[in-house]
Amino acid sequence: MRGRMFSCGLDAAMNVIGGKWKALILWALHAEPRRFGELRRDLDGISEKMLIQQLREMECDGVVHREVFHQVPPKVEYSLTPLGQSLNAALLPLGLWGDEHLAAIEDKKKQQAAA
Amino acid sequence: MRGRMFSCGLDAAMNVIGGKWKALILWALHAEPRRFGELRRDLDGISEKMLIQQLREMECDGVVHREVFHQVPPKVEYSLTPLGQSLNAALLPLGLWGDEHLAAIEDKKKQQAAA
DNA sequence: TCAGGTACTTACCTAGAGGTAAGTGATCGG
DNA sequence: CCGATCACTTACCTCTAGGTAAGTACCTGA
């Protein structure tokens, strides 16, 4: 394992999706390609700066594809690469787990905030 | 969606596993309960401070169970709660995805580092 | 001109995540 | 006494990640 950047596949995957907004962005791109402004509006609380930053990082990682349309007003679309699609498929069980336990997780966080 | 802490299940799940060492720790606890020192030795590069910190956080989140044995030398065991077990099950596809694409991910990171 | 649309970029800031190093306490055995 | 075991805790520090605010460029229409 010496000289390897990641100790296992899970470590590598967490590196790709680690970032405050990445998982949500990946999910927002699940159904169809989206434009920057669309993503911005859908992702509650994200700033333009954070959005472009995380998109760029995921583009570099090969999970997001960016397509520029030469028109005015500018049009840029973001979509999942095949790699990104397989990543989203792998994220589905985790999202379902979160859905199922959402209330419990929030309760725990509230208790922690109160203590 | 107002007043909710998390925008969806995936957001909540990412909050629980977010932390440099959490996913790896959860995986280290997959097969059986482990002791602190064991975990420390298995997780290459982790400090005691980071290990206990992340264990504590996951304990608060209800995914890790800590059991103190009153003996000398001290013995403390960490194990997955049922919630933690289901979380690990949900993480499995992600880990497999990472295994499958490990080389590609590392290549991408190397390119980025060189640029 | 101004205001609107689009997709960014840049300057600056700081909270907090992660880290290093040293220390604690309770025992046991040499 | 010392050194070992175990599982932490504490003090201090760095710097990354995330954030706010303002700005840029290209156009169109009133």
Image (spheres, coloured by chain):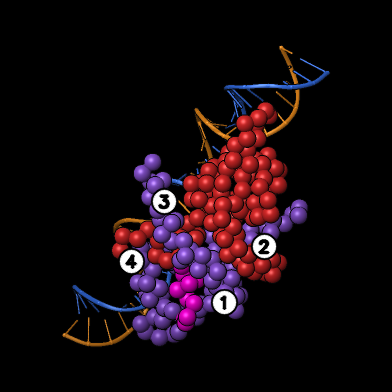
Chain colours: A purple, B red, C blue, D orange
State the image coordinates of residue C17 (x, y, percent, origin top left): 50, 48
Quadrant holding the C terminus of chain B: bottom right
Q: Nearer the viewer, mark 3 or mark 1?
A: 3
Q: Which mark is residue A9?
A: 2
Cα gap from disc 2 to disc 3, whole angstroms? 29 Å
Say whether residue B112 is left or right of residue A36: right
Going from N to C along the chain, the mark reached first, 1 or 2, is 2
Are dots 4 and 3 on a single chain?
no
Disc 1: CA contacts within 10 A as few (<14), some (14-19) or many (>=20) = some
Secondary structure at badge 3 equals helix
**Looking at the image, can residue A41 be seen?**
yes
Quadrant holding the N terminus of chain B: bottom left
Say which chain tag 4 marks. B
Q: Amino acid at mark 4?
A: Met
Going from N to C along the chain, the mark reached first, 3 or 1, is 1
Cα gap from disc 1 to disc 4, whole angstroms? 26 Å
Say which chain tag 2 marks. A
Q: Which mark is residue A109?
A: 3
Q: Amino acid at mark 2?
A: Gly
Say which chain tag 1 marks. A
Q: Are marks 4 and 3 in contact (CB under 8 Å)?
A: no
Cα gap from disc 4 to disc 2, whole angstroms? 34 Å
Secondary structure at badge 2 equals helix
At x 56% / y 60%, what residue is drawn?
A: B87
Secondary structure at badge 1 equals helix
Q: Is residue C26 above or below residue A108?
A: above
**Looking at the image, can residue A54 be seen?**
no
Q: Which mark is residue A85?
A: 1
Q: Which residue is mark 4?
A: B1
